[in-house]
Amino acid sequence: ALLSVPALLWAATTNSLQAIQAALAAAGVAYGSMAIAIPVHVGRVCAPEDFARLYGKVFLCWGVCGLIAPLVAGRLFDIYGNYRVALLLAGIAAILAAIASFLMPSDKQLLQEINTVKSRYDEASP
């Protein structure tokens, strides 16, 4: 998310077609890198037997956003006659996502919490 912020805000604030194309290409690279990073991160913070279920939920949310965002961007284009507002909103969403990722517990903390919950579950099971 943090990698896409400057690109999206640059695309939203420039009038140069070449700059917009370069900014959106950079945002596309950032988006593509997330396609690699997200499953790796999910795999690091969950047990192997939980990966498919948890990553399925992440990917479902990603897909829903991928369906809704273009419709919203198109509607904003119809209202304003350009994509500036849609790109600003995407930049703001990326900033919020970056802030949320910094506020999340570290992998080590998550693994400790998962192990604590599992040990409690194992102790409670007959």
Image (cartoon, rainbow, N blue to C red):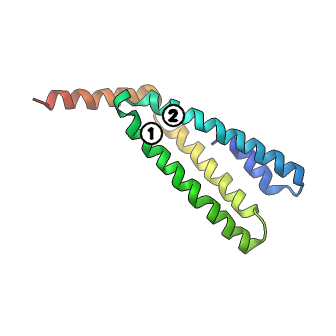
Which residue shows up at 68% across the image and 39% down it?
30
Q: Is 43 left, or right, of 29 in this rendering?
A: left
Q: Where's residue 58, x and y in %?
A: 47, 44
Q: Where's residue 110, x and y in %?
A: 40, 31
| Cβ atoms at labels 2 and 1 below 8 Å apart | yes
Q: Say if residue 2 shows up in the picture.
A: no
Q: Where's residue 45, x and y in %?
A: 43, 30
- Secondary structure beneath label 1: helix
Which disc, if any, is residue 55? 1
Reply above or below: 62 against 74: above
What is the quadrant of the C terminus in the image? top left
Mark-to-mark CA distance, 2 and 1: 7 Å
What is the quadrant of the N terminus in the image? top right
Q: Say if residue 21 shows up in the picture.
A: yes
Q: Quadrant of the rendered structure where residue 123 is?
A: top left
Q: Earlier in the sequence, mark 2 or mark 1?
A: 2
What is the residue that sits farthest to the left in this orientation? 126
Pointer 1 local density, CA inside 10 Å: few below 14, some 14–19, many at least 20? some
- Secondary structure beneath label 2: helix
Which residue shows up at 76% across the image and 48% down it?
24
Instruction: Give the amino acid at mark 2.
Output: Pro
Looking at the rendered structure, the number of numbered marks drawn on it comes to: 2
Instruction: Give the amino acid at mark 1.
Output: Tyr
Q: Is 10 left, or right, of 52 in this rendering?
A: right
Q: Is 30 left, or right, of 53 in this rendering?
A: right
Which disc, if any, is residue 39? 2
Q: Quadrant of the rendered structure where residue 73 is?
A: bottom right
Q: Where's residue 90, x and y in %?
A: 66, 54
Which residue shows up at 88% across the image and 54% down it?
17
Q: Is 36 left, or right, of 124 in this rendering?
A: right
Which disc, if any, is residue 112? none
